[in-house]
Image (cartoon, helix red, strand yellow):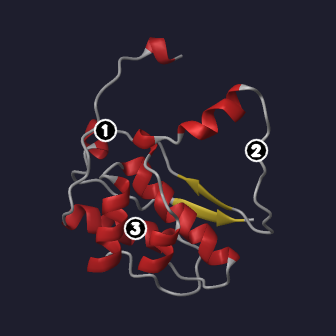
């Protein structure tokens, strides 16, 4: 399927008001009992540094942090919980994980009683990929 579509580079987000609005939108969709204030200076910079400005990384970091917050009962994302993720951006994939997957080995799955999923509608305009005038009002997290 990849050969049917031309690849288009997606610019990275900049640490700006649009980025902070994205974090606010993601937080509004989180099923956490306590406010995390993701757009606060310290936590926003921590997420930005780990994500390298890539939208998929930003959402992945927030989703993993929210999942951990539910698991440990904190019900809130903090700068410390973001840093504790030991996030490795997808551009720097850990090559030690590749052989296990390549050889068909099943990696152990974490034991959890609740799962957090993320549903986002497909973008309708290229500008939504650029972080210009986009809205994440339709982002939904679910807890099972």
Element marked by disc 2: loop
Q: Residue furthest top?
A: 3
Task: Evaluate if marks 2 and 3 touch, with contact meaning CB atoms under 8 Å apart.
Answer: no
Residue at 31 percent across and 52 percent down: it is 52
- Taking the image as drawn, is residue 78 in sight? no
Q: Give the x, y percent position of residue 87.
A: 48, 58
Element marked by disc 1: loop
Nearest to viewer (mark 2 / mark 1): 2
Residue at 56 percent across and 62 percent down: it is 64
Which quadrant would residue 112 be assigned to in this image?
A: bottom right
Label annotation for residue 107: 2
Quarter of the image with the C terminus is bottom right
Q: Give the x, y percent position of residue 56.
A: 43, 48
Question: Mark 2 vs mark 3: which is more N-terminal?
Answer: 3
Residue pointed to by mark 1: 125
Mark 2 → mark 3, Cα distance in angstroms: 33 Å
**Dot 1: within a 10 Å radius of its alpha carbon, few (fewer than 14), some, or many (20 or more) residues?**
few
Element marked by disc 3: helix
Answer with left or right where residue 139 lies relative to residue 39. right
Mark 2 → mark 1, Cα distance in angstroms: 37 Å
- Taking the image as drawn, is residue 55 in sight? yes
Q: Give the x, y percent position of residue 43.
A: 35, 75
Nearest to viewer (mark 1 / mark 3): 3
The answer to whether 132 is drawn above or below residue 27 in the figure is above
- Foreground residue among 19 and 80: 80
Mark 1 → mark 3, Cα distance in angstroms: 19 Å
The answer to whether 139 is drawn above or below residue 95 in the figure is below
Residue pointed to by mark 3: 25
**Dot 3: within a 10 Å radius of its alpha carbon, few (fewer than 14), some, or many (20 or more) residues?**
some
């Amino acid at each position: 399927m990849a050969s049917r579509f031309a690849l288009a580079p997606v610019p990275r987000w900049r640490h700006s008001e649009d980025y902070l609005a994205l974090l606010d939108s993601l937080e509004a969709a989180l099923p956490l009992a306590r406010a995390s204030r993701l757009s606060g200076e310290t936590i926003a910079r921590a997420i930005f540094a780990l994500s390298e400005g890539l939208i998929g990384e930003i959402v992945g970091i927030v989703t993993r942090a929210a999942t951990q917050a539910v698991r440990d009962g904190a019900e809130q994302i903090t700068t410390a919980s973001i840093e504790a993720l030991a996030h490795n951006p997808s551009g720097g994939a850990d090559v030690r994980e590749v052989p296990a997957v390549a050889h068909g080995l099943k990696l152990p799955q974490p034991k959890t009683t609740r799962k957090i999923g993320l549903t986002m509608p497909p973008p309708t305009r290229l500008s939504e990929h650029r972080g210009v005038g986009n809205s994440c009002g339709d982002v939904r997290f679910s807890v099972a």
